[in-house]
Image (cartoon, helix red, strand yellow):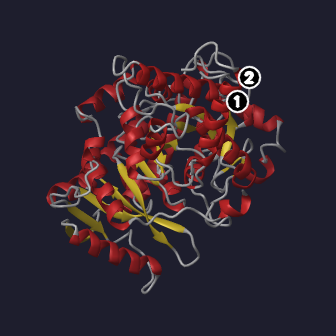
Amino acid sequence: MLPSAAPARCLLLLLLAVAVAGAAFDLEEATVDSIRRAFADGELTSRGLVELYLRRAAALDPSLHAVVELDPDGALAAADRADDARRLFASAGGGALPPPPLNGIPVLVKDNIAAAGGGGALNATCGSLALVGSRPAGDAGVVERLRRAGAVVLGTASLSEWCNFRAPGIPAGWSPRAGQGKNPYVPSATPCASSSGSAIAAAANMVAVTIGTETDGSIMCPSSYNSVVGIKPTVGLTSRAGVIIISPRMDTVGPICRTVSDAVHVLEAIVGYDPRDAEATRMALQYIPEDGYRQFLNIDGLRGKRLGILRKDFFRFPSGSVQQKVFDEHFNTISKMGAILVDNLEIPNMNIINDAVQSGERALMLAEFKLSLNSYLSELASSPVRSLSDIIDFNNKHPVEERMAEFGQSYLLQSEATDGIGPTEKKAIAKLNELCESGLEKIMRVNQLDAIVSPGASAHSLLAIGGYPAITVPAGYASNGVPFAICFGGLKGSEPRLIEIAYSFEQATKVRRPPTLQHSII
């Protein structure tokens, strides 16, 4: 610390030195660990890091549309608190509590997740203009945990409006609030599914880490198409309190990051019991390892693992294609790393599962969405709309902004026409549970598998209907430059094994490369 009588010029020089050090820090492919090292070495401050990311977002987002809102005042105040915590710990010589694990790490949360703290509450609008001006009574459960872990909430990431549940045919990544999200690798390609903004921002190095949500493919698919790592946790492992969801049976909140290690750091911070999502989070407590998830970042994690390759229905690539060649190479690498590949497996009832998803699951989701959305709206401290019916009316009154003539709102109307979970919906739930038992659970049990392997998000419905976890890891780039991923999925609570497998694969292959689009924009 400078003595109180130190000249103002010394203080100015110190501030300039900090600014220069922050400016010299390379954001490209920065990880949680590299950022923490820069903090510890005095090369970077949390404030400097937040300022760097804010500048990068300002440069990139006009083209990528990955961000809905930023909270610079709140983020900078939180960054200052993080810097103070580190200085206090350093000056105390170990006599103070160490800073929390994500201390000073900036994060973007998907725009369906409430963030009430900071300089001013961020709108959680699910991409809709109808919710602009709404204010949550408090942080979502996962945001509470992120703040407790020291993370700095930078703002909200864009998404497909209403988590892609407004009407069929709406382009993935579009919302009236943020416009059309763009794939940073191939702008004409889809960014895929509703957590698109989180994946775009992570891929383009616009923030350290991001949070997405998934009902049926919305973490897995954008992670695949944007060459980032996505963890879809077991349902209930992370709280859905304060989150706009579609289905309490299937919705889960998880990290989307550039590396498996970063995603695991975030996962470890956001899991746990939440009395506001009591039933699901209490049930999932049994799956959380006592010493956390970072212990499973094992470079030799593939050794001895039994992996089932779901060839039929999933690996549908033309002979001689880039994807076919790349996956053959990856399977060879996985074998060399000591894993046991059980090939040519088939989910016996996959056609029935697909039919159920298109019929029974859809009808069930319509009923669940209305209940979940109305519950969320009722808990807001203030809001211009208080029900799904209000939102439908808003859209009708704002047809140009919401592009009603082009897209309509058929799912919203169908959802509004439902009347809770009745006999039809309960029958659908029973059918889906039966398909889980005779499908994935049976094939895992019979073949004694640690995980199944599929390309990209192709197995999203298979994993969604049972609330099962998955990790997608960058696997390659198609001939047109569009990224694709490999997915490791398993039964409930199998995150420790999936992390070992995914991390070992990532370290053996190191496929991910940053997009070149950002260089032409900055």
How far apart marks 1 and 2 lie (CA) works out to: 7 Å
Residue on which the image places disc 1:
131
Q: Are marks 1 and 2 in contact (CB under 8 Å)?
A: yes
Would you say residue 111 is visible in this rendering? no
Q: Answer with the quarter of the image where residue 312 lies.
A: bottom left
Q: Amino acid at mark 2?
A: Pro
Q: Position of residue 70 (x, y in %)?
A: 68, 35
Residue 460 place in picture, x, y as percent: 42, 55
Q: Is residue 38 above or below residue 2?
A: below
Residue at the disc numbered 2: 384
Q: Where is residue 308? Give x, y as percent.
A: 24, 64
Furthest-top residue in this view: 4
Q: Earlier in the sequence, mark 1 or mark 2?
A: 1
In this rendering, would 250 be left or right of 173? left
The residue depicted at 41 percent of the width and 34 percent of the height is: 423
Taking the spot 77% from the left edge, 43% from the top edge, the residue there is 402
Give the label on residue 330, or none: none
Q: Please tell me in which quadrant of the rendered image residue 451 appears.
A: bottom left
Which secondary structure, mark 2?
loop
* Label 1 environment density (alpha carbons within 10 Å; few <14, some 14–19, many ≥20): many
Query: Horizontally, is 248 left or right of 55 in the view?
Result: left
Relative depth, front residue between 188 and 240: 188
- How packed mark 2 is, by other alpha carbons closer than 10 Å (few <14, some 14-19, many 20 or more), is some
Q: Residue at x 56, y 25 (%)?
A: 376
Q: Which quarter of the image is occupied by the C terminus?
A: bottom right
Number of numbered labels in the structure image: 2
- The local secondary structure at tag 1 comes to helix
Q: Quadrant of the N terminus?
A: top right
- Residue type at mark 1: give it: Leu
